[in-house]
């Protein structure tokens, strides 16, 4: 109801403005995702229609307001739903060399392709079913100030006073039946606990880049055990909590063009905050780096990238043994139950944060071609993790039926061994999708 | 106006003995405006009755160091609305080019597209819409012809090397330059096999800077002689302004739109 009230107020404000200062755009789409799991018959994973209404109101040269409202109805993962989401709603205030953006917004960081380890400001919905990668991004409440003292220099400062967690559909992950995972806890508003970030962009003739810093809540919360059930465990249930943790990231990125080839790189050193004692559920400090290139060869464009990670203070651990609740009928097991479950949950966190190995290396390759006078696009994304053996194959074709009306189809195929992220998500994601979208 | 009279008078006296390369250079130089704002409509026809439209606004300015900066913002169709392109065209150095796409939410430094590649799915190539390097080609005078009631020099233009020919995707072209205002009226492109490929017509030529004698071509039409596809580009709302705001040529500007 609050959402509808906000929409009403916003619309009322908009209609007061002169017509030339207000623009309305958006899209309506019909999307279907089919699930194909091993030899099982195909299932319908998602079938929905969505309308995005984007409103932009300009107030001369001093400011503008932008809102993206999404209405969605259909079914997803066997659940029927109707939703109204305020994806973004912010004000831009232009004060000469200083620009302010205040409100719910999506402003990602990072110049590399494939992965942006410096972007700790943008939460993600990892299980959103959409062919458009941008739909994975979630808006959060943020105050952003950008200062452009010179053409080659941009200084940015950000404050995120209210934590918005990334969304991970653990209900779609193959977990033991006795485990329930609660929604992420929100630490609420505490001024001194706001996430803060700063970035300095340098744009020179041949090369551009930035150095950045972030301190605050990591968008993706960790899994922690709730209260353990007490003996004699007649009806054994384990409740897991999603708890946000704080971290600090030092980052840098660059982009340049050498001999007709775009070259980009990104680096981030993430240091999670520990309390007085080491919390085994919080991920280790890690260093991530990405190098990517892109080049056009006639109608073909190739994007390639290498992503690496080093986990500091890494202690090897084997994947946990399958836990059989029946074994807890033996009282001798009871003292070991806590450490056993803690080890298992810690390992889940290692999977979640891609910290199952001290060093890991992945490559990305995305050839794409545009044909028939830019009416048909075909791209294939391939991702392979040399360390864990996980891989993704994602072909996608898009045809422009007319200006604004496109049809697209593709296939997502994730594969990975047990106790890997791709093995967690493959049953939820593997299969073809189809979409018609009309943009207005 | 005095400048224009002098300019045309000089052209009239010299037209008999002018070198074709000098004509091409003069033609190029006098279409380089120090600052311009305009709206462009690109009409793409597939020759079978289907039509697509692209509308952009453009601002350009030549800075004292010779760098020409351009920013292009897409107004329609809806699926590309909000896209912005920023180009810093340096003399003797590789261009800097960025694209801002609303779906990416950040500016991306990109490689300049290949010269022979079609511009936005039209029959225009990127090279057709850019300022050519005069030394990339050799020029031969091939007499005079009348186009649109204008007496024109007919100049055969050939790429200087096979590499340049491959870059532009042509084997040669013929350009008709008006003896009156030194502006082109027509260009015929030959494909790599030497066969007629595309024909481009220029009209709506306007004197924008009377002091420096600078012209602007506001209408171009190109027709593919092989498949019947054709595209038209029409510039409107043109404002000559040597002091176009510097902020138009920044990443912050294209990201704000």
Image (cartoon, coloured by chain):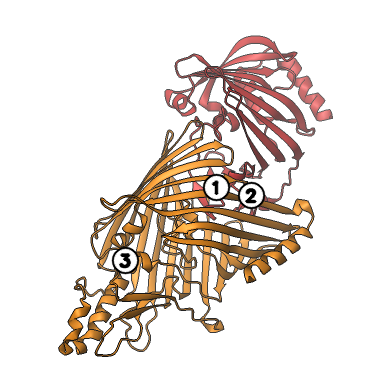
Query: What chain is colored red?
Result: B
Label 1, label 2: how far apart the Cα atoms are? 12 Å
Residue A266 sits in which quadrant?
bottom left
Q: Which mark is residue B249?
A: 2
> A136 and A324: which one is in front?
A324
In the image, residue A307 lies at what x, y percent? 33, 57
Camera-side mark, 1 or 2: 1
Whether callout 1 and callout 2 share a subunit is answered yes
Q: In the figure, what tint was chain A given? A: orange
Image: A150 above or below B244? below
- Residue A229's place in the image compared with A107, above or below, is below
Per the image, label 3 sits on a secondary structure element best described as loop
Task: Say which chain tag 1 marks.
Answer: B
- The residue under the point 57% across, 25% down is B46
Q: Nearer the viewer, mark 2 or mark 3?
A: 3
Residue that mark 3 sits on: A354
Q: CA distance from mark 1 to mark 3?
A: 32 Å
Mark found first going from the N terminus, 1 or 2 = 1
Name the residue tied to disc 1: B99
Chain of the residue under the numbered disc 3 shown in the image: A
Q: Residues within 10 Å of mark 1 (few under 14, many from 20)?
A: many
Sort mark 2 into few (<14), some (14-19) or many (20+) by Cα contacts within 10 Å. Answer: many
């Amino acid at each position: 109801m609050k959402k509808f009230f906000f929409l009403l107020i916003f619309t009322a404000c908009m209609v007061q403005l002169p017509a030339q200062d207000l623009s309305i755009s958006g899209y309506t789409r019909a999307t279907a995702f089919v699930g194909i799991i091993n030899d099982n018959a195909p299932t319908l994973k998602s079938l929905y229609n969505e309308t995005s209404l984007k409103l932009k109101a300009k107030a001369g040269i001093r400011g503008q307001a932008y809102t993206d409202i999404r209405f969605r109805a259909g079914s997803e993962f066997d659940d029927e739903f109707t939703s109204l989401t305020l994806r973004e709603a912010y004000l831009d205030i232009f004060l000469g060399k200083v620009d302010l953006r205040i409100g719910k917004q999506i402003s990602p960081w990072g110049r590399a392709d494939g992965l942006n380890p410096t972007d700790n400001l943008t939460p993600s919905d990892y299980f959103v079913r959409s062919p458009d990668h941008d739909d994975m991004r979630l808006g959060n409440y943020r105050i952003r100030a950008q200062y452009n003292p010179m053409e080659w220099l941009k200084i940015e400062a950000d404050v995120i006073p209210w934590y918005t967690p990334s969304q991970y559909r653990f209900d779609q992950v193959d977990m033991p039946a006795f485990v329930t995972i609660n929604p992420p806890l929100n630490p609420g508003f505490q001024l001194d606990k706001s996430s803060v970030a700063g970035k300095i962009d340098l744009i020179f003739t041949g090369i551009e880049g930035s150095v950045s810093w972030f301190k605050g809540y990591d968008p993706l919360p960790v899994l922690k055990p709730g209260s353990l059930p007490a003996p004699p465990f007649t009806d054994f249930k384990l409740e897991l909590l999603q708890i946000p943790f704080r971290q600090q990231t030092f980052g840098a990125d660059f982009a340049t063009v050498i001999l007709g080839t775009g070259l980009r790189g990104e680096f981030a050193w993430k240091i999670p905050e520990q309390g007085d004692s080491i919390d085994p559920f919080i991920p280790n400090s890690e260093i991530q780096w990405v190098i990517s290139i892109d080049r056009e060869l006639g109608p073909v464009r190739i994007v390639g990238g290498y992503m690496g990670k080093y986990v500091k203070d890494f202690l090897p651990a084997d994947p946990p043994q399958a836990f059989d609740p029946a074994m807890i009928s033996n009282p001798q097991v009871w003292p070991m139950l806590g450490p056993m479950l803690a080890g298992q949950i810690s390992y889940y966190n290692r999977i979640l944060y891609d910290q199952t190995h001290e060093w890991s290396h992945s490559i990305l390759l995305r050839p794409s071609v545009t044909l028939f006078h830019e009416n048909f696009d075909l791209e294939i994304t391939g991702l392979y993790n040399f360390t864990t053996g996980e891989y993704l194959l994602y072909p996608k074709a898009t045809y422009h039926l007319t200006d604004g009306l496109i049809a697209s189809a593709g296939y997502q195929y994730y594969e990975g061994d047990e106790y890997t992220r791709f093995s967690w998500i493959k049953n939820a994601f593997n299969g073809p999708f189809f979409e018609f979208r009309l943009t207005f | 106006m005095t400048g224009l009279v002098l300019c045309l008078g000089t052209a009239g006296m010299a037209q008999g003995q002018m070198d074709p390369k000098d004509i091409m250079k003069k033609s190029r130089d006098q279409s380089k405006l120090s600052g311009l704002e305009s709206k462009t409509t690109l009409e793409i026809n597939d020759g079978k009755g289907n039509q697509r439209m692209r509308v952009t606004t453009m601002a350009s300015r030549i800075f004292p160091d010779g760098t020409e900066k351009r920013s292009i913002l897409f107004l329609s169709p809806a699926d590309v609305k909000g896209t912005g392109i920023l180009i810093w065209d340096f003399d003797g150095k590789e261009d800097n080019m960025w694209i801002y796409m609303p779906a990416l939410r950040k500016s991306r430094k990109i490689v300049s597209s290949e010269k022979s590649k079609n511009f936005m799915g039209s029959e225009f190539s990127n090279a057709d819409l850019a300022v050519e390097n005069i030394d990339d080609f050799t020029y031969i005078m091939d007499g005079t012809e009348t186009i649109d009631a204008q007496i024109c020099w007919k100049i055969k233009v050939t790429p200087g090397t096979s590499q340049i020919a491959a870059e532009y995707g042509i084997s040669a072209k013929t350009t008709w330059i008006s003896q009156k205002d030194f502006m082109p009226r027509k260009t015929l492109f030959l494909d790599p096999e030497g066969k007629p490929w595309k024909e481009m017509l220029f009209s709506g030529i306007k004197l924008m800077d009377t002091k420096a004698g600078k012209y602007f071509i506001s209408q171009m039409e190109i027709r593919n002689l092989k498949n019947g596809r054709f595209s038209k580009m029409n510039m409107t709302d043109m404002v000559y302004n040597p002091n176009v705001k510097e902020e138009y040529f920044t990443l912050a500007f294209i990201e704000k739109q």
